[in-house]
Image: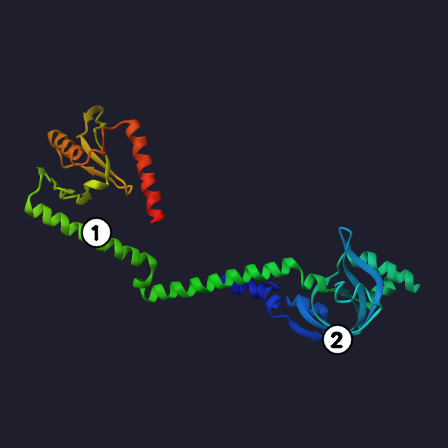
């Protein structure tokens, strides 16, 4: 938002949307230096020079000259405006773009000088250094730029005010609404797990409890409640590490992987407890993948991707 506002003052963007209306006597160079590149000019007594501006074989505009300030100015007029180059126009009011020292003058001025019997320097002394181009002032690129800038400005303004509202009232933000919805679901599951734990836990192994629908770990450093129907893969794993140059075995850990990309480590279990938990989970949910293998890892990744796609669809 701030960048767009700064651009409106540092570039001619502002004059594209709100062009200033000027008449004969206004300095074109001064307007251009003030970033007023696009203006609505009110011309009087325009005369056709006899020359046209062509792009890829098509006539883009017709060169006219008119008195402007103390000199004459060259005006490039669209074919429709000048009816394909009528000799004289009494007046014209149109949006134009100021183009200082265009390359077209290097070709146009010598031709005008030849027609008048003057030299090139004499013609340049009588002409303003800026070209007033009606085709450039109404070009497709300019209109497209205005549309893109307007969309960006509207989006920036909407985002600015939205974020301001979210700062004042965080509960209105989409993230907090999603978090609130998730927290309600989590609270509901915790209440269900608490009821099942208080009634009759199906399996108790150390700090790990398994009820009809949940796997619960209540260790001092870890606490988690995992719905059994969300578990897709369980495996045990034990590594080795070096202590003072000697290999020491690491205690086996139970890993639980869920559809929601959860990756849990149950460290409060002995070897026998891990076997019991794995056996119970495999009976409670036969679709759970058992054991650490590359095949199971690939299957688990596929299941998680499918679950993520289903969440997006919903």
Residue at image position (64%, 68%) is 34
* Colour approach in the figure: rainbow
Nearer to us of marks 2 and 1 is 1
Residue that appears at 8% across and 38% down? 204
Q: Secondary structure at mark 1?
A: helix
> What number is the disc on residue 186?
1
Q: Looking at the picture, how far across and down is residue 127, in whole percent?
A: 81, 67
Q: Residue furthest left?
A: 199
Residue in the image at 14% along x and 47% along y: 193
Q: Looking at the rendering, which quadrant does residue 230 occupy?
A: top left
Q: Is residue 231 left or right of residue 209?
A: right
Residue 118 relative to residue 84: left or right: right
- Closer to the chain start, of discs 2 and 1, is 2
The location of residue 307, given as percent across then percent down, is 31, 42
Q: In the rendered image, which quarter is residue 117 located in?
A: bottom right
**Can residue 1 be seen here?**
no
Q: CA distance from mark 2 to mark 1?
A: 74 Å
Per the image, the residue denoted by label 2 is: 24
10 Å crowding of disc 1: few (<14), some (14-19), many (20+): few
Q: Dot 2: few (<14), some (14–19), or many (≥20) neighbours within 10 Å?
A: some
Q: Nearer the viewer, residue 307 or 42?
A: 307
* Side (left or right) of 47 relative to 293: right
The outermost residue toward the top is: 246
Residue 183: which quarter of the image? Answer: bottom left
Tell me if label 2 and label 1 are in contact, CB under 8 Å: no
Q: Is residue 57 visible?
A: yes
The vertical placement of 254 against 199, above or below, is above
**Left or right position of 105 against 7:** right
Task: Give the percent coordinates (x, y) of residue 38.
Answer: 66, 66
């Amino acid at each position: 938002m701030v960048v767009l506002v700064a651009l409106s003052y540092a570039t001619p963007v502002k004059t594209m949307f709100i062009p200033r209306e000027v008449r004969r006597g206004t300095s074109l160079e001064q307007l251009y230096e003030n970033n007023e590149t696009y203006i609505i000019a009110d011309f009087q007594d325009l005369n056709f020079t006899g020359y046209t501006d062509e792009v890829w074989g098509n006539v883009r505009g017709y060169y006219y000259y008119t008195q402007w300030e103390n000199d004459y100015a060259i005006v490039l007029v669209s074919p429709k405006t000048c009816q394909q180059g009528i000799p004289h126009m009494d007046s014209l009011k149109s949006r134009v773009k100021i183009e200082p020292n265009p390359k077209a003058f290097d070709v146009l001025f010598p031709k005008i000088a030849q027609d008048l019997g003057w030299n090139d320097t004499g013609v340049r002394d009588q002409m303003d250094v800026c070209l007033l181009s009606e085709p450039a002032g109404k070009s497709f690129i300019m209109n497209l730029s205005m549309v893109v800038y307007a969309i960006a400005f509207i989006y920036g303004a909407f985002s600015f005010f939205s974020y301001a509202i979210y700062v004042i009232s965080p509960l209105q933000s989409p993230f907090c609404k999603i978090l609130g919805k998730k927290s309600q679901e989590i609270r509901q599951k915790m209440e269900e797990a608490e009821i099942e734990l208080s009634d009759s836990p199906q399996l108790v192994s150390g700090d790990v409890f398994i009820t009809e629908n949940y796997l619960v770990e209540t260790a001092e450093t870890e606490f988690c409640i995992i719905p059994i129907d969300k578990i897709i893969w369980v495996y045990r794993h034990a590594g080795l590490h070096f202590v003072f140059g000697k290999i020491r075995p690491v205690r086996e850990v139970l890993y639980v992987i869920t559809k929601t990309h959860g990756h849990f480590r149950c460290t409060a279990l002995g070897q026998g407890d891990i076997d019991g938990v794995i056996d119970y989970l495999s009976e409670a949910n036969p679709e759970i993948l058992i054991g650490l293998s590359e095949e199971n890892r690939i299957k688990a990744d596929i299941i998680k991707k499918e679950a993520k796609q289903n969440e997006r669809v919903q």
